[in-house]
Each structure stands twice: as C-alpha cells, then as structure tokens.
Image: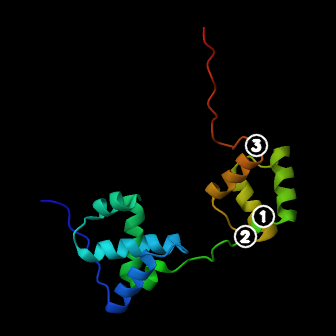
Amino acid sequence: MGRRRTQLELTGAELREAQRLALSEAEPRNAERAQFALLGATGDYTLEELAVELGRQRSTLQQWLAKFRAGGLAGLLARETAPGLASPIATARVQRQLQAGLQAGRWTSAAHVAEWLKCTHGIRRSRKSIYYWFEKYGVASPGIKTPTRRRAA
C-alpha cells in the first residue's frame, strides 16, 4: 500500500488567489506556498512527491500542511514575524558588549550568553542563534569541538 495522497481543499476565492500568487515574482515566498496549495489541491501527490516537486524537505511541507489545515490559504501565507525585522541583538550597544565578552572568554557556553542576554537586556534567544555570534566574532563555540587536521607523514 502506497503513501496517502495529500488533498487540500481550496475555496473558489482561495483557488483564484493561489493561482495569482503562484505567478507572482514580487513575493517568491508566497508564490512557492501557493504552488504547494495548488499542487496539493489536485490530490495527485503524496507529501514526499510534493517535497521533491518543490525542492523542499518533507518536514517543511508538513509544517505548511499544518498551517493550511489550521487557517486555509491565509494561514499558510501568514508570517509569524515581520520580514526584515532587525534582531535586538544587532543594536550597537549589545553588539559591543557581546563581542567584548565573547573575546574575553566571559561565558563558557551559549546557555550562559542566553542567560546574560535575558537578564541584562531582556532578549530571549536560542543556543543556535547564539552560536551564530560565536562564529561571527571568530570565537570558538563552547562545547563544540573543532576538528584538528592531521599532518601527513
């Protein structure tokens, strides 16, 4: 028995909007999601096949499917945060303090940096987000071993 086909139900208005968005060059994000909705509405594809067709991971399409089922096409297109929103960590003051602390070895883990950001600046960030700053400032990330090169004999 094969995998179940993905079947999305689009209203007439959603179908027209998805067709319009799928052709839009101004909003590539929305065009891609609209294409997902249109292909899913045919009922001809499994989620795996849709992932291959759209060049995305299956897990991404599972998230899109959940958003679609929760809120239709509008839910699929909705943004959780505004595009281009600047990170509060990117302010000059926080950057100076963060860079100085990282280079001085003030923190021994990303969790310590996260705690400092939360207590000092009221900023909450994941460890993954914080590792970005370790790399940006050329500081070895605590807890992550850097590979050493072996010398040829």
Cβ atoms at labels 2 and 1 below 8 Å apart: yes
Is residue 45 in sight in this rendering?
Answer: yes
Distance between the Cα atoms at labels 3 and 1? 17 Å
Asked whether, in this view, residue 33 is left or right of residue 118, the answer is left
- Image mark for residue 139: 3
Distance between the Cα atoms at labels 2 and 3? 23 Å
SS for callout 3: loop
Residue found at the far top of this picture:
153
Quadrant of res 23: bottom left
Kindly report which numbered mark, 2 or 3, lies closer to the viewer in this rendering: 2
Residue named by callout 1:
90
Distance between the Cα atoms at labels 2 and 1? 7 Å
Asked whether, in this view, residue 89 is left or right of residue 97, the answer is left
Up the image or down, 52 lies above or below 9; here it is above
Is residue 65 in sight in this rendering?
Answer: no
Asked whether, in this view, residue 107 is left or right of residue 44, the answer is right
Cβ atoms at labels 2 and 3 below 8 Å apart: no
Kindly report which numbered mark, 3 or 1, lies closer to the viewer in this rendering: 1
Residue type (three-letter) at the residue carrying disc 3: Val
The residue sitting at 69% across, 43% down in the picture is 142
Residue named by callout 2:
86
Residue type (three-letter) at the residue carrying disc 2: Ala
Up the image or down, 78 lies above or below 152; here it is below
| Image coordinates for residue 95, horizontal then vertical, percent | 83, 59
SS for callout 2: loop
Up the image or down, 64 lies above or below 53; here it is below
